[in-house]
Amino acid sequence: MTIRRISSGSAFEPQIGYCRAVVAGGFVHVAGTTGSDHETMVLPPSVEEQCRLALGHIRNALEQAGSSMAHVVRVTYMLPDRADFQACWPFLRAAFGDNPPAATMIECGLIDPAMKIEIEVTALLPDAAD
């Protein structure tokens, strides 16, 4: 089986020892993704903006892998404060549209107290989706 690793260019990847996504066995496994600006490493203060940025990072990784948000089959949302989750719903509906994945939301601490959401997805490669 061929395994392909995709980097987003985030400074955290080499520091921690992971990559944004791994393509293997017909799937794209996207690591937990937060809403920081990868060029400046600045986190916006709102959960909405962090959610929007995280979804954009995920979308980019999926496209680099040859997949898309429409092929996401599983998503896990991790938030330090579950009360923030509802503010993200419009962004999540827009991101997944008519193709909602199976989903789980977990309330937990994140690596940086300024982080308000982390999103992890698993998607199929389009040729494996049939």
Image (tube, grey):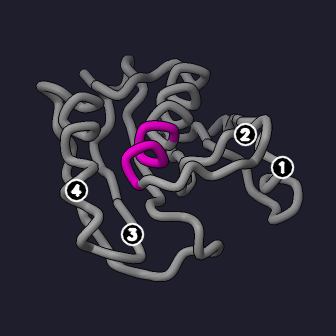
The residues colored magenta run: 47-53
Q: Badge 2: few (under 14), some or many (20 or more) residues near its Cα, within 10 Å?
A: some
Q: Badge 3: few (under 14), some or many (20 or more) residues near its Cα, within 10 Å?
A: many
Residue receiving disc 1 = 11
- Of badges 1 and 4, the one in the foreground is 1
Q: Amino acid at mark 3?
A: Leu
* SS for dot 1: loop
Rendered image: mark on residue 103: 4
Rendered image: mark on residue 79: 3
Please report whichever mark, 3 or 1, sits nearer to the chain's N-terminal start: 1
* Residue lying farthest to the right in this orientation: 15
Q: Amino acid at mark 4?
A: Ala
Residue drawn at the location 61% of the way across and 42% of the way down: 21
Q: Is residue 117 magenta?
A: no
Q: Amino acid at mark 1?
A: Ala
C-alpha span from label 2 to label 1: 7 Å
Residue drawn at the location 56% of the way across and 49% of the way down: 44
Residue receiving disc 2 = 38
Please report whichever mark, 3 or 4, sits nearer to the chain's N-terminal start: 3
- Contact between marks 2 and 3 (CB within 8 A): the answer is no
Please report whichever mark, 2 or 3, sits nearer to the chain's N-terminal start: 2
Q: Seen in the image, is 32 located left or right of residue 73?
A: right
